[in-house]
Image (cartoon, grey):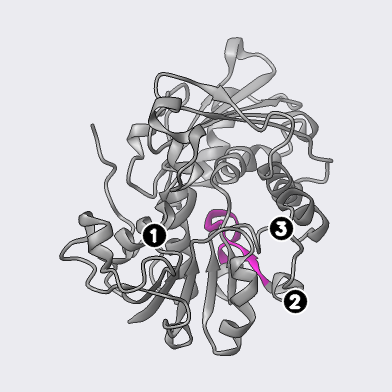
Amino acid sequence: MIKVGIVGGTGYTGVELLRILATHPDAQLTAITSRKEDGLPVADMYPSLRGRVQIAFSSPDKANLAQCDVVFFATPHGVAMAQAQELLAAGVKVIDLAADFRMKDVTQFEKWYGIPHTCKDVLSEAVYGLPELNRDAIRSARVIGNPGCYPTTMQLGFAPLLRAKVIDAGSLIADCKSGVSGAGRKAEIGILFSETSDSFKAYGVSGHRHTPETIEQLQQMTDQPVGLLFTPHLVPMIRGMHSTLYARLTADVGNEQLQALFEQAYRNEPFVDVMPFGSHPETRSTRGSNMLRIALHRPNNGHTVIVLVVQDNLVKGASGQAVQCMNLMFGLPETTGLMHVPVLP
């Protein structure tokens, strides 16, 4: 059994990790930390876990994380980098759901996150945790920087086109929407029910921290300079993400060829569903699951290809992807504990 610790178990990605790992056949929940909720049984905070998770939250100073085989950080940015070295020295593997180990460019990290990077030596060995694009490196990694939710959709949506060299890498557009849970579990006016219900808005239009993360990864897929316009939006639903991606074709390819690029790229991927050309995937078709669905469109058979991508922002966009990485790191079948059927309606 893999002994698992979770730092920051009270937030949405934390409880999603608990939900997944509670029924994972090869994982044993060993420590769940929270300073504020020290001693509180996990199931008292999250009744959905009654009968599934028996342990209580413990403050970080009481939790012996060094006894774990892997520790997930479901925490704000900056927490994992403060503890990673000590855990690694004890032989513990680290999976960070925040941004501490996502970007190799420290200057960009410090610019967008507003904090100094204090763990550059660990960053140098960290592996970006997007299994469909980085599987082999994840298997041998000690430290994983789990991708952001929006970047997951953009990378898997653009990757087959960039690698086939059939689009202009310098003029990519991503029009993306996320449910409110993407903002985290906190008391903030902008995400209150009365503020978000029956409303729709863009945010981060002048610049968003997921842009440099995505460009850094996309640049590895092409020798062209990558240019990306990314606009996120907040939609009045709890969970779910829909990304509409636009790219200008530079090669003479037919619709069947475009479809074949995606089907071939993801034909053996258990968590990527390439739908028939012209389909319209819905966020509810992935709710509560680690599945990501993709569909292609080409209006009027013109020079623009549109890629529609949907996922659950808390599962494939966060905690499910982290468990997918854990499975690879410990030599388990990648799908272990992750074959949940989406919840519908």
- Looking at the image, can residue 178 be seen? no
Determine contact: label 1, label 2, CB under 8 Å. no
Pointers 2 and 3 in contact (C-beta within 8 Å) = no
Q: Is residue 128 magenta?
A: yes
Question: Which residue carries the number 1 mark?
Answer: 10
Label 1 amino acid?
Thr
| Residue 282 vertical placement versus 29 (above, below) | above
Residue tagged by mark 2?
Answer: 121
In the rendering, at what x and y percent does residue 92 appear? Answer: 52, 83
Q: Residue at x 34, y 40 (%)?
A: 287
Q: Where residue 218 sits: x, y (%)?
A: 71, 46
How crowded pointer 3 is (Cα within 10 Å; few <14, some 14-19, many 20+) is rated as many
Q: Residue at x 43, y 88 (%)?
A: 67
**Residue 83 pos. (x, y %):** 60, 77
Q: Is residue 72 above or below residue 265?
A: below
Task: Tell me residue 310's x, y (percent).
Answer: 46, 35
Residue 11, image quadrant: bottom left
The residue segment tinted magenta is 126-136
Disc number lying in front (1 or 2): 1
Q: Amino acid at mark 3?
A: Met
SS class of the residue under badge 1? loop
- Crowd rating for badge 2 (residues with CA inside 10 Å; few <14, some 14–19, many 20+): few
Q: Secondary structure at mark 2?
A: helix
Q: Earlier in the sequence, mark 3 or mark 1?
A: 1
The kind of residue tagged 2 is Asp
Q: Is residue 108 visible?
A: yes
What residue is pinned by disc 3? 103
